[in-house]
Amino acid sequence: MHRSNAIALGGALATAISFGPARMGFGLFLPQFREEFTISTQQASFIASAGFAGFFMALILASLLVARCRSA
């Protein structure tokens, strides 16, 4: 296996293991969160969107770091 494929596979597995259960857990427990913390629909949407935005920014940062380390 090429080194780049191993890195990509490792990143994909890390994402699936860490982000997947958290996303599903948020969705499953959202009704209880909304009731307990009086979260509106808009606030719940912002929380979910913030998670995706953070994930997207981390992907961009990771690609920049890989490009920088590759050229070094």
Image (cartoon, grey):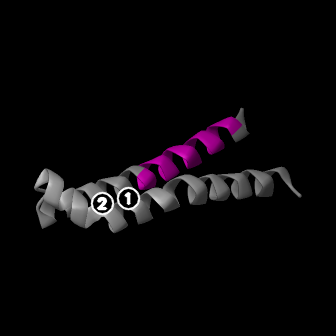
Q: Amino acid at mark 2?
A: Ala
Secondary structure of the residue carrying tag 2 is helix
Do the residues under discs 2 and 1 have CB atoms within 8 angstroms? yes
Q: Is residue 67 magenta?
A: yes
**Quick one: label 2, few (<14), some, or many (20+) residues within 10 Å?**
some
Residue at left offset 10%, top offset 55%: 38
30 or 61: nearer the eye?
Answer: 30
Q: Position of residue 55 (x, y in %)?
A: 44, 53
| 27 over 59 or under it: above or below | below
Quadrant into which the N terminus falls: bottom right
36 or 1: nearer the eye?
Answer: 36
Quick one: which residue is furthest to the right in this view?
A: 1
**Quick one: label 1, few (<14), some, or many (20+) residues within 10 Å?**
some
Q: Amino acid at mark 1?
A: Phe
Residue 41 found in image quarter: bottom left
Residue 27 found in image quarter: bottom left
- Residue underneath mark 2: 48
Label at residue 13 = none
Secondary structure of the residue carrying tag 1 is helix
**In the visual, does 62 lie left or right of 34?**
right
What secondary structure do most residues of the magenta stretch adopt? helix
Label at residue 52 = 1
Q: Which residues are magenta?
A: 55-69
Quick one: which residue is furthest to the top in this view?
A: 72
Q: Is residue 25 magenta?
A: no
**In the visual, does 43 lie left or right of 18?**
left
Front: mark 2 or 1 = 2
63 or 31: nearer the eye?
Answer: 31
Q: Position of residue 30 (x, y in %)?
A: 27, 63
**In the visual, does 49 lie left or right of 4?**
left
Q: Position of residue 50 (x, y in %)?
A: 30, 53
Residue at left offset 83%, top offset 50%: 3
